[in-house]
Amino acid sequence: MGKRAIAILSAGVRRDKKGVWSNSNLTEQSDSLGAPGGRQRVIAASYLYKLKPDYFLIACGGRGYDIKDKSPNRPDLCQITRRELIKLKVPADKIITENKSNTSFEQLRELKKIIIKFKLETILIISSQYHLPRVKALINLRLKPLKKDLAAGAVKLVSAEKILLKQNPEKWREPIKRAYSSEWMKLRIKKERQGIKDLKSNKYKF
C-alpha cells in the first residue's frame, strides 16, 4: 500500500426487494433508515480515486450504530462499501476494510490505528456535509492524536457533496440542493448540532 489514503465513513444501509444491501441515498426515505448519504460518499470516493490513483481506499464500519435492520445475514458496512467501490471501477486490491467500529467516534479511532499501521502521510476522510462538523468536533475534543494530524494537514476532512458538485455538477446540483433545503435535512442538521453541544458539555453518548 502507498502512503496516502481516502477513508469513507459509513452511513445507513438499505436492502432492496431482491435482498441486496446498499448504502443509503441522500433522501428522506434513507434518512428514516439511518444516516443518509452513504452512497454519495462512495461515489465521491471513486471520483477522488480517479484523480489520485496512487491513494488506496479505506472502507469503514462493522455492524453499525443506527442501522434499522440488523439482520445477522447483512454484510458489515465496510463490505457493502467495498462492493460498491469495485462496481465503480476501483481495483479490489486498492481497498482495505475496517470492521471493528460501529459509531463515528469508533471509526475515527480505528482510522488512527490504520494511519500508524501503514505509516500514512496523508488521509482524506470523506463524509456527508451535514456530518463533518460533528466529525471535526469528535477529533478536536476527544481524539487528541487525530487532532494533531488534522492541525498539521496530514488528516483532511472532505465533503462528499462538494466533490460530487465539482466533478459532475449537472448530475448532482439538483439532488443535493433538494436534500439540503428539505425539512428532514434541517432536522438531521439540528441533531448533529446537538451532538456537538453534548460533546462540549460531556453529555455525549459514545
Image (tube, rainbow, N blue to C red):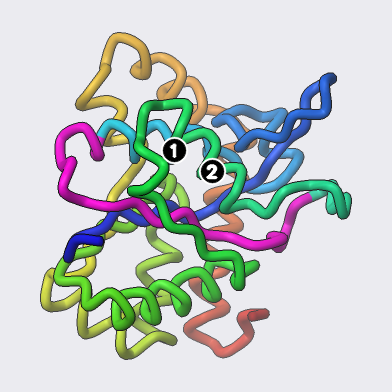
Can you say which quadrant of the picture contains the N terminus? bottom left
Q: How far across and how far down the image is residue 18, in percent? A: 82, 21
Q: Residue at x 33, y 90 (%)?
A: 144
- Name which quarter of the figure residue 92 lies in: top left
Q: Pointer 2: what residue? A: 81
Q: Residue at x 42, y 52 (%)?
A: 8
Tell me the mark number nearer the camera, choosing from 1 and 2.
2
Q: How far across and how far down the image is residue 39, in percent? A: 52, 34
Q: Pointer 1: what residue? A: 42
Identified by mark 1, the residue type is Val
For the residue pair 200 and 87, the one nearer the viewer reads as 87
Range drawn in magenta: 48-67
Q: Residue at x 75, y 39 (%)?
A: 32
Local SS, label 1: helix
Are there few (<14), some (14-19), or many (20+) residues within 10 Å of tag 1?
A: many
| Number of numbered discs on residues | 2
Describe residue 131's horizontal placement relative to residue 34 as left or right. Answer: left
Identified by mark 2, the residue type is Thr
Of all residues, the one furthest to the left in this rendering is 152
Describe residue 62's horizontal placement relative to residue 104 as left or right. Answer: right
1 or 2: tag closer to the N-terminus: 1
Of all residues, the one furthest to the front in this rendering is 93
Can you say which quadrant of the picture contains the C terminus? bottom right
Describe residue 165's horizontal placement relative to residue 53 as left or right. Answer: right
User: Distance of mark 1 from mark 2, alpha carbons?
Assistant: 7 Å
Q: How far across and how far down the image is residue 191, in percent? A: 60, 57
Magenta span contains residue 66: yes
